[in-house]
Image: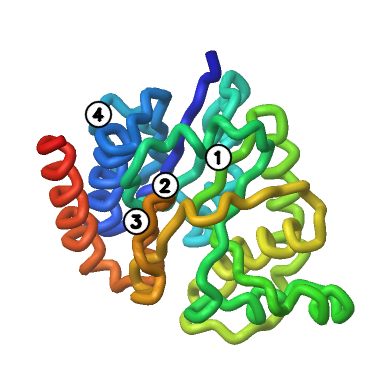
Amino acid sequence: MSKQVVYYTAFGSNPYYQNAKISIQSLIELGKFNGDIVVFSDKPFEYFGVINILIQPDHFSKIFELRYIAGQYFDFSKYDKIMYLDTDILVVRPINPLFENGLDFIYFEEPDYYFLTGSISSIFFDWKTRLTKIYKHSINAGQFVVSGKLYPKMMKIWEQNVDKFRHRKAPVFNWKIKKTWFYDQGALNYIIRTNLIEAEKIYGSIRFPICPWQYTKKSHILFHYAAFPVQLVPKLMQKQLDKRLKLLTKE
């Protein structure tokens, strides 16, 4: 039987920890997930029996880097499938389809209309690649699924390309985030769009609720509240979770 793990990173103020608890509850109760759950955090985190890895980051960037350097703090080698989720993601349907498709790496695209656009991500491309890839939707690094056999290689390539492009200049909204989160996202776009890693996407499996034109489909498994004001997200996630749990009890 396949062994699976989902990991999160929760650092900083209380909303991130609230989000993590809501997301984990949705993962278990709506996502029907019964594998291991790991939470990397800077404060003790006890919830639904998760494995908690305490880290005191020595730099702001470490919070974002944990997406691809988590293997330095936890042994993922025993898992067949590994999934990363941002804490502001609600799992709304059984999550097994994202694990049981035989693919080694699954990524998720954003609607290409806000915040981190495909054209900004393409700042990492050479000019020829940029001309051919600029139209592509941006790949959101807040969730991905990777096989256990590919995980070490995938994370190493991701880390190498973040380091490779740290010197690139690009327009972003927050100077502090510029050298961390932006390069994390951009490097993932680069390695997938230039086929450094063979990857697939599953259509219709994710919704970004901040885009009203992205209506809910029966195929949606994840709701990612990306770019919402941090203080609002827990309330919105909790409201959606309560609504769906209530519907579940009526079935």
Badge 4 is on which residue? 48
> In 3D space, how far apart are the residues under numbered discs 3 and 4 (Cα atoms)?
17 Å
Q: Return the disc, 4 or 2, that comes first in the chain's sequence.
A: 2
* Label 2 environment density (alpha carbons within 10 Å; few <14, some 14–19, many ≥20): many
Identify which residue, 89 or 10, lies in the foreground: 89
- Above/below status of 149 relative to 239: above
Q: Which residue sits at x=14%, y=48%?
A: 242
Dots 1, 2 in contact, CB < 8 A: yes
Q: Is 80 situated left or right of 44 in this image? A: right
Q: Which residue sits at x=33%, y=29%?
A: 50
Dots 2, 3 in contact, CB < 8 A: no
Q: Position of residue 31 (x, y in %)?
A: 34, 37
Identify which residue, 220 or 132, lies in the foreground: 220
Of the two numbered discs 1 and 4 in the rendering, the one whose residue sits closer to the viewer: 4
Badge 3 is on which residue? 88
Dots 3, 1 in contact, CB < 8 A: no
> In 3D space, how far apart are the residues under numbered discs 1 and 4 (Cα atoms)?
21 Å
Q: Return the disc, 3 or 1, that comes first in the chain's sequence.
A: 1
Q: Return the disc, 3 or 4, that comes first in the chain's sequence.
A: 4
- Residue type at mark 4? Phe
Q: Is 10 situated left or right of 163 in this image? A: left
Badge 1 is on which residue? 70
Badge 2 is on which residue? 9
Q: Return the disc, 1 or 2, that comes first in the chain's sequence.
A: 2
Dots 4, 2 in contact, CB < 8 A: no
- Above/below status of 148 relative to 55: above
